[in-house]
Amino acid sequence: MEAVQNDALAKIAGSIVASPDPGRAMKAWRSKVGIKQVALARALAISPSVLSDYESGRRPSPGVQFVKKYVEALVRLDEGRDRVISKLVASEKDEAILSIGEFHSPVDAAAVLGALDARVLTGDERQVRLYGYTVVDSIKTIYALSGYDFYRIFGATTERALVFTKVGMGRSPLVAIRVSQLKPRMVVIHGPKDIDPLAVDLAKRERMVLALSGAPSEEALIAALKGVSPQT
């Protein structure tokens, strides 16, 4: 039971801290679990109005210590009821990785970018060769994967294209990569028409190639990756 709780704590706290709007992320988790604001405020020993201010963004972004206490209280209340969090974390972990593959020989990044109808936002792809790819659901990855689970997306090597789908503005995936010890060689964002400048800056700092895919759907994107072959 303790291991399950710790897993849930890490995943929820990570998703809140990585979110561009921590207050909204906290509220989203509380609503998903079905905990009343009054009950959670009581568990935190604060007034409902103070908690409401944090969740609505009327107060400055909560610090790490408050997020930790918030998530601990949320998990504690949930474990005494329906254990919704444990079920959500378990199911989303399995669904976060949409497709993963390894190339039997290195592939030029340009070939992958072409298959994904992707344009480069930062980085020099001309000298990059890739050995695999992973396609992940951005929302479920941020919510469900942390620690060792997050490293699963790198497959056999970090010299791969990491493709995030269902992306808002691109900030959260890059923040998650920023705090991870392992870095992919190339990141491809799928979903938005434009990318948050912060995401581009983070990619520059990590010296990664960052690209935006124009693939019409997740299915088309995955099919295109499966069709990429090393040049002979």
Image (cartoon, grey):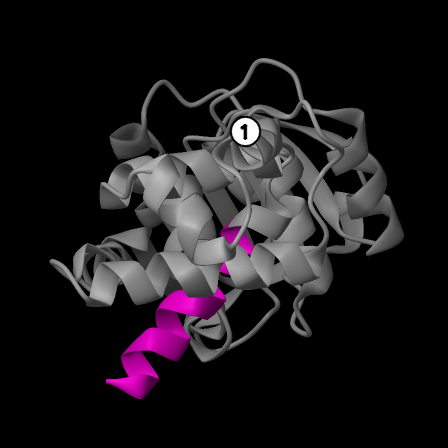
Residue sitting at 51 percent across and 75 percent down?
A: 147
Vertical side of 167 occupied by 202: above or below: below
Q: Nearer the viewer, residue 11 or 228?
A: 11
* Label 1 sits on residue: 49
Residue 192 screen position, x and y as percent: 53, 19
- Total labels drawn: 1
126 with respect to 95 (left or right) = right
Residue 208 in magenta stretch: no
At x 54% / y 29%, what residue is drawn? 49
Q: Is residue 117 visible?
A: yes
The kind of residue tagged 1 is Ser
Q: Residue at x 66, y 36 (%)?
A: 171
Q: Pick whichever, 187 or 21, lies toward us.
A: 21
Q: Secondary structure at mark 1?
A: helix
Q: Position of residue 114 (x, y in %)?
A: 54, 32
Q: Position of residue 201 (x, y in %)?
A: 85, 38
Q: Is residue 94 left or right of residue 52?
A: left
Q: Is residue 202 left or right of residue 106?
A: right
Q: Residue furthest top?
A: 193
Q: Please, is residue 20 above or below residue 35 in the view?
A: above
Instruction: Pick whichever, 76 or 177, lies toward us.
Output: 76
Residue bounds of the magenta highlight: 1-15
Residue 55's x, y, as percent? 54, 32
Is the magenta region chiefly helix, strand or loop? Answer: helix
In the shown orientation, is residue 126 left or right of residue 37? right
Say whether residue 134 is visible: no
Residue appearing at x 59%, y 40% in the figure: 19
